[in-house]
């Protein structure tokens, strides 16, 4: 696997969750397959509230949210604090509220274009965009790709 965003000074600092201020954990998530190689990006997942941070240059938020949800086994559950005013874990500026075409709510950083998606909104985004069967297929595909070789 290759990493699409190995470089960048922001990766040298652990991200703090915009929602609950817990240190986030970095996950390698497949972004695409190119000539048989899986190109991987690093996303940050909060172990407390299960929120997902996707950096602006990582790729499509919906696609990476779907793959991140598929990667979390067993599935994590999370909540969201509707009164919270989250800040960007990369540069500390307040995040702007953003609505997707599918009705999910996420937060975007106007400086780095990163996006924060709470766990409930991530599930809403994936299900609204692809339906339940598409979501189940994404989970099965990820598990199949990441099976330990025997």
Image: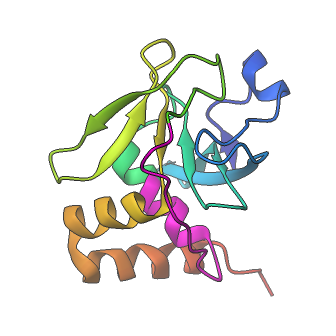
Horizontal side, residue 1 vs residue 29: left or right: right
Which residue does the image show at 46% across and 51% down from the upper left?
A: 64
Secondary structure character of the magenta stretch overall: loop
Q: Quadrant of residue 113?
A: top left
Question: Relative to residue 62, is residue 66 depicted above or below?
Answer: below
Q: Residue at x 73, y 30 (%)?
A: 6
Q: In the displayed structure, would residue 78 be above or below residue 139?
A: above
**In this view of the protein, which residue sits in the foreground, 144 or 134?**
134
Identify the residue at image location x=70%, y=53%.
27
Q: Is residue 68 magenta?
A: yes
- The quarter of the picture where the C terminus appears is bottom right
> Which residue is outermost to the top?
111
Q: Is residue 130 left or right of residue 97?
A: left
Does residue 76 appear anywhere in the picture? yes
> Which residue extends farthest front?
83
* Residue 139 located left or right of residue 97: right
Horizontal and vertical percent position of residue 39 = 58, 45
Question: Magenta stretch?
Answer: 65-84
The picture quadrant where one finds residue 145 is bottom right
Which of the pair 29/145 is nearer the observer?
A: 29
Can you give x and y, in whole percent of width and height, for residue 24 in the image? 74, 47
């Amino acid at each position: 696997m290759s990493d699409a965003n190995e470089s960048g000074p922001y990766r040298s600092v652990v991200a703090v969750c915009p929602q609950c201020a817990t240190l986030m954990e970095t996950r390698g998530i497949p972004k695409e397959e190119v000539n048989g190689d899986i190109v991987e990006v690093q996303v940050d997942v909060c172990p407390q509230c299960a929120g997902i941070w996707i950096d602006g240059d990582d790729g499509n938020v919906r696609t990476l949210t779907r793959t991140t949800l598929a990667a979390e086994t067993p599935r994590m559950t999370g909540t969201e604090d509707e009164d919270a005013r989250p800040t960007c874990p990369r540069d500390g500026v307040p995040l702007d509220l953003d609505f997707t075409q599918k009705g999910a709510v996420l937060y975007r950083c106007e400086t780095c274009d990163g996006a924060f998606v709470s766990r409930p909104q991530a599930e809403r985004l994936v299900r609204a965009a692809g339906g339940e069967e598409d979501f189940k297929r994404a989970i099965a595909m990820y598990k199949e790709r990441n099976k330990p070789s025997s």
